[in-house]
Image (tube, grey):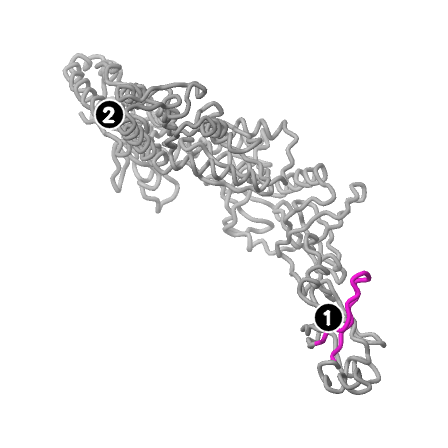
Amino acid sequence: MQVILAESAGFCYGVKRAVELAQRTAAETGGCWMLGDLIHNAHVVRDLADRGIKKTTERETLGVGDTVVIRSHGELKSVLDALERQGVHCVNATCPNVIRIQELVSKAEQEGRQVIIIGEPHHPEVVGEASWCAHPLIFQGPEELTQWLKGADFDVSVPVTVVAQTTCIRELFETSCKILKKQCTNVKIFDTICYATRKRQTEAADIAAKVDVMVVVGDRKSANTQHLAEICRQNCSRVLQIEGADELSAADFAGCALAGLTAGASTPAGIIKEVKTTMSEEIKATEGMEESFEELLNQSFKTLNTGEKVTGIVTGITPTEVQVDVGAKQYAYIKLSELSDDPNVKPEDVLKVGDEVETYVVRVNDVEGYAELSKKRLDAQKIWENIETAVEEKTVLEGTVTEENKGGIVVSVKGIRVFVPASQSGQPRGADLSAMKGQKVQLRITEVNRARRRVVGSIRSVTDEARKAAQEAIWSSIEVGKHYTGTVKSMTSYGVFVDIGGVDGMVHISELSWSRIKNPAEICKVGDTMDVYVISFDPEKHKISLGAKDHSVDPWQVFMNKYGVGDVAEVRVVKLMPFGAFAEVVPGVDGLIHISQIADHRIEKPEDVLSEGQIVEAKITAIDEEKKKISLSIRALLTPAADDEAVEE
């Protein structure tokens, strides 16, 4: 019998730091205070009390000359401010990871971002972190977050900052973040689950999957211990959450061949060692009971019958077969040919030792004591059942396009060939369907004939439905000024059409750039991603006018900040007129070069010297701020001496 102890079980860096800091402070001061429990472990708190560290929950009782150790979970900002006003000396034992979260939410508050914390709302760490910003939102996981998003009148364009409680279960945090990424347009995510927690949770899950009994040690008030127990229960049917060795008994380990042990971040090494020793003794005590169980065990063996379904546990894998314990007297196995439809598959690619597998009994030989099983046959039967159900329920399935066929394409859905006619492929008429080969697609099954092994599907029904839903979502939430990230779908001489999520809007050429352009192709091409905002829209005519210019920038102000009268600028000729030429000084701001200022000699027309698009140097000779007009001169740079003499005369 063996006990597997998790390497990361016990004190994490933050807890160890807090305890050592408290012990050192008590020794230096001859006695000090802690506000509440320094860490969530009754054994440690009692030890600290024996060292002269008194506990109080009333900060008002502390005064000048008192020393208080701030617990590892952190404290309310208002409490820390009050202690400072009271003249209390604070020794901050807050975990550095928690301090980082406090700083992140405080910074987010200053930047005008909405703070969202994924964690337990009433846990002291989360309560403390939330106090470092004005209006935080706290959700325990994706379910609460989803419910809130459905019922809340929340502007999805509001910038959001997301953090996690340091001991949060990773799956809850990651799922919550995926939801927010889909719903909100500006999300900053900070993975603040501490490394020790991540490692401890991963180790616990791995060990729990291998053992018969899993023991989790830690104070019942400890959030990270509770989370460890939850994770272990997902991987092991027998999980014991205890605070100490005295809670264990031999009955807990009946029939146990392998046990696992982990502990929360606030569990001392001494308690872990005591529990491990006790576990080893209790497991050993159950070994003598095995003989008395033998008769009951024989009675519990299953009777196998050809053609029935049976579930077992993979006990061994060889290059030719997979050995399965199905709870019967017979030696049960799956031949490689009965494992998968893929002739090139390796057994270890399909199953691993310890996996639960559902199979079909092909043959039972009681004389020689073996049973042949088939996973492939049962999988095929279940797939056909699922396909038939998918037709009735109009379920959306996923598959991979494997080939172009006469009149359409073939999609592999869980090993079943599904024919999709060209008209249902979701592609335009006459499109090259071979380009879809290898793509993952979503489709609905429209027809099944199991006897003929014929299945027909439609990709178009899914894409049309998704596009319709996207369009409805756009029209239900669209408003002037709202920003979208879209894709350029088509181009004309007067502008471009941008898909903003199922609906196309038009960006006029004048709204593409502050610079004068003659053709949208100078700025973008089909397929480009473009950030746009709504200028106007007409729901009845289904027309949307979009803009792409950054209106937060004032081109005139940019010009005024950069240039003054007498400065020389490199300008681009944008339009030729009989009386002169207009030239772009900065994007969005043009100046006039009068015909008399183009050359150092008389010219008949501007195009004799200049051409549109030409880059030239010109001197700024006048600025009319009120009318926002600029006068430019090329001549002033060509004959400076002659111009100076003319001024003196």
Q: Is mark 1 on a helix, strand or loop?
A: loop
Residue 153: in magenta span: no
Q: Name the residue located 76 percent from the left edge and 60 percent from the top edge.
A: 494
Q: In which quarter of the image is residue 318?
A: top left
The three-letter code of the residue at mark 1 reads Val
Q: Position of residue 419 (x, y in %)?
A: 56, 44
Q: Mark 2 points at which residue?
A: 272
* Along the viewing direction, whichever of 382 and 67 lies nearer the viewer: 67
Q: Mark 1 points at which residue?
A: 565
Image height of 151 relative to 487, above or below: above
- Mark 1 or 2, nearer chain start: 2
Q: How far apart are marks 1 and 2 (CA)?
A: 80 Å
Q: Quadrant of the N terminus?
A: top left
Q: Residue furthest front?
A: 64
Report the side of 537 relative to 102 (left or right).
Answer: right
The three-letter code of the residue at mark 2 reads Ile
Residue 620: in magenta span: yes
Q: Name the residue located 28 percent from the left edge and 35 percent from the top edge.
A: 322
Q: Which contiguous range is marked in magenta?
A: 618-634
